[in-house]
Image (tube, rainbow, N blue to C red):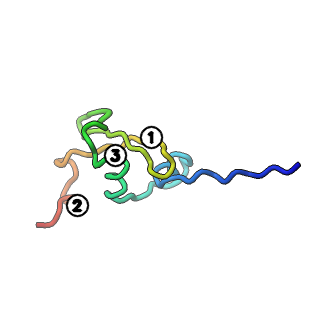
Amino acid sequence: MQFVQEPAPALGPLSLVLQDTGRPPVDVSIEYLNGITGNFAVARVIGKGAFGDVHLGIDTISNDFLAVKKMNSHLRGPAATPET
């Protein structure tokens, strides 16, 4: 009898980091974060703190649930401020 090994499920970039804690941090695009949080929808806020709101994210590849903190704008610093 032969056993067929099922392929490993696909993982999104944040899920990969969660699966392997030795993996270095990864950069993800704002488009990806907007997509997994419903554009940081108010309905997806699962927590609030001094540094910002925490939103429920659902990885579009693996369907993993993720917590994504959106930092308050006054904490982001000049590097995150758009050019005028």
The amino acid marked with disc number 3 is: Thr
Is 62 situated left or right of 73 in this image? Answer: right
The alpha-carbon separation of the residues under discs 3 and 1 comes to 10 Å
**Circle 2 residue:** 79
Residue plotted at (81% across, 49% down): 3
**Residue farthest bottom in this picture:** 84
Say the numbered circle drawn on residue 37: 3
Mark 3 Cα shell of 10 Å, populated few (<14), some (14-19), many (≥20): many
- Residue 67 horizontal/vertical position (percent): 38, 40
Looking at numbered disc 2 in the image, what kind of residue is underneath it?
Answer: Ala
Q: Is residue 67 above or below residue 73?
A: above
Seen from the viewer's position, the closer of residues 55 and 48 is 55
Q: Residue furthest right?
A: 1
Residue 59 position within the rendered picture, expressed as x and y whole percent measured from the top left: 44, 48
**How far apart in space, not on screen, are marks 1 and 2 (Cα)?**
29 Å
Residue visible at 54% across and 47% down?
A: 21
State whether residue 35 is above or below residue 50: below
What is the secondary structure assignment of the residue under circle 2? helix
Badge 3 marks a residue whose secondary structure is helix
Which residue type does callout 1 highlight? Phe
Label 1 SS: strand
The residue where tag 1 is placed is 65
